[in-house]
Image: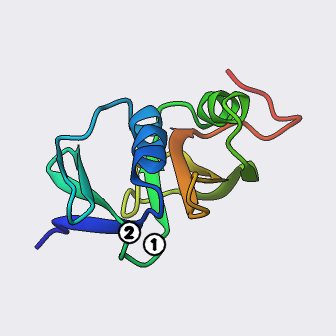
Amino acid sequence: MRAAQIAQFAADLPRATAFYAGLLGAAPVASFDPPGLVFFDLDGQRLLLERGAPSALHYYLVDDVEATVERLRAAGTPVEGEPHVIFTHRDGVLGPAGTEEVQAFVRDTEGNLVGLVQHRACQPAVGTATE
């Protein structure tokens, strides 16, 4: 089983659509207004922006969390949590083994919290020798 769709609250559909198009780097694949629905394709999973949906916390995998946060900050997006290491993937169960899970949090145009995630190679501890 896999998730088919995530619904996200959007009071202002055009504004929310512009935000998610910029964040995801892709245009919506379908819009129906009325009743006020905008769909994005996330590699086979749908993101639905809808006026009547509750707020949901999404986490998006990005290549470079610091660069993504800076790009969004420059566009006026509120940053709620700067990039920081959450944990290390030692066994590959939740992410690639030998990587750190780095997360940051921003607010979309509708006030929803959005998580950004990067799996990056573990950084050597300060003061340790590398060969």
Q: Is residue 67 above or below residue 3?
A: above
Depth check, front residue: 113 or 49: 49
Q: Is residue 24 above or below residue 31?
A: above
- The three-letter amino acid code for the residue at tag 2 is Arg
Q: Which residue is mark 1?
A: 56
Residue at figure coordinates x 31%, y 31% from the top left: 26
Residue 35 percent location from the top left of the image: 21, 66
Within 10 angstroms of label 2, few (less than 14), some, or many (20 or more) residues?
some
Say left or right for 41 vs 11.
Answer: left
Q: Which mark is residue 51?
A: 2
Residue 79 percent location from the top left of the image: 73, 49
Q: Give the position of the N terminus as an image quadrant.
A: bottom left
Residue 14 percent location from the top left of the image: 41, 45
Pointer 2 or 1: first along the chain: 2
Quarter of the image for residue 112 reads bottom right
For the residues labelled 2 and 1, the Cα–Cα distance comes to: 13 Å
Q: Give the position of the C terminus as an image quadrant.
A: top right
Q: Secondary structure at mark 2?
A: loop
Say left or right for 39 vs 61.
Answer: left
Within 10 angstroms of label 1, few (less than 14), some, or many (20 or more) residues?
few
Say left or right for 65 vs 129.
Answer: left
Name of the residue lying farthest toward the left: 1
Q: Which mark is residue 100?
A: none
- The three-letter amino acid code for the residue at tag 1 is Ala
Residue 87 percent location from the top left of the image: 62, 60
Name of the residue lying farthest toward the top: 131
Depth check, front residue: 16 or 88: 16
The mark closer to the camera, 2 or 1, is 2
